[in-house]
Amino acid sequence: MRIGHGYDVHRLVEGRRLVLGGAEIPWEKGLLGHSDADVLTHALMDALLGAAALGDIGQLFPDRDPAYEGADSVELLRSVTGYLHKNGYRIGNVDCTLIAQRPKLAPHIPEMRRILADAMGVDLSRVSVKATTEEGLGFSGEGLGIAAHAVALIEEQ
């Protein structure tokens, strides 16, 4: 078994969709980034790649490459899952935490879990997503951005 950790953060801006774990969250702001800026899925991909020592999403999907402009991060997660399988790994379980003062994310967590589990081809029971605030502290507490942490357990096939 191998364990990996991922972290990502993006700035909140007006005029962008807010996508977290593949779910579109209705809100006045979205995350700024080259792709859809889905911090949750980005952190998860980095955790999976890190567990296998296969680099990170910046190496696989560079933001300098126009092919990934506006990319759907869930589709990138499908690619990462295939890359893991090709290299002899299967996903055991993942545990993710979103850090955002607003909007309220709890109502959207079941959809995020379902989307991520489907993209990785694992049972829903192997995907945990949680959300927390920073009690008004720091960039996320001030509503400037959203961060995500992810931990992944993978196993050799």
Image (cartoon, rainbow, N blue to C red):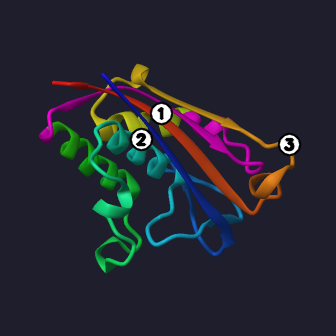
Q: Could you tell me which secondary element the residue under label 2 belongs to?
A: helix
Q: Nearer the viewer, residue 110 or 44?
A: 44
Quadrant in which the C terminus is drawn: top left
Which quarter of the image is occupied by the N terminus?
A: top left
Q: Amino acid at mark 1?
A: Val
> Marks 1 and 2, how far apart in space?
6 Å
Question: Can residue 149 be seen by looking at this rendering?
Answer: yes
Where residue 147 appears, x then y in whole percent? 63, 51
Along the viewing direction, whichever of 106 and 89 lies nearer the viewer = 89
Residue 93 position by quadrant: top left
Could you tell which of marks 3 and 1 lies nearer the N-terminus? 3
Residue drawn 19% across and 44% down?
A: 82
Name the residue beneath numbered marker 2. Answer: 47
Tell me if mark 1 has few (under 14), some (14-19) or many (20+) residues whose alpha carbon lies within 10 angstroms of its own: many
Q: Which residue is mark 3?
A: 135
Asked if the magenta segment contains residue 88, the reply would be: yes
In this figure, which residue is indicated by the disc labeled 1? Answer: 151
Q: Which residues are magenta?
A: 86-109
The alpha-carbon separation of the residues under discs 3 and 1 comes to 23 Å
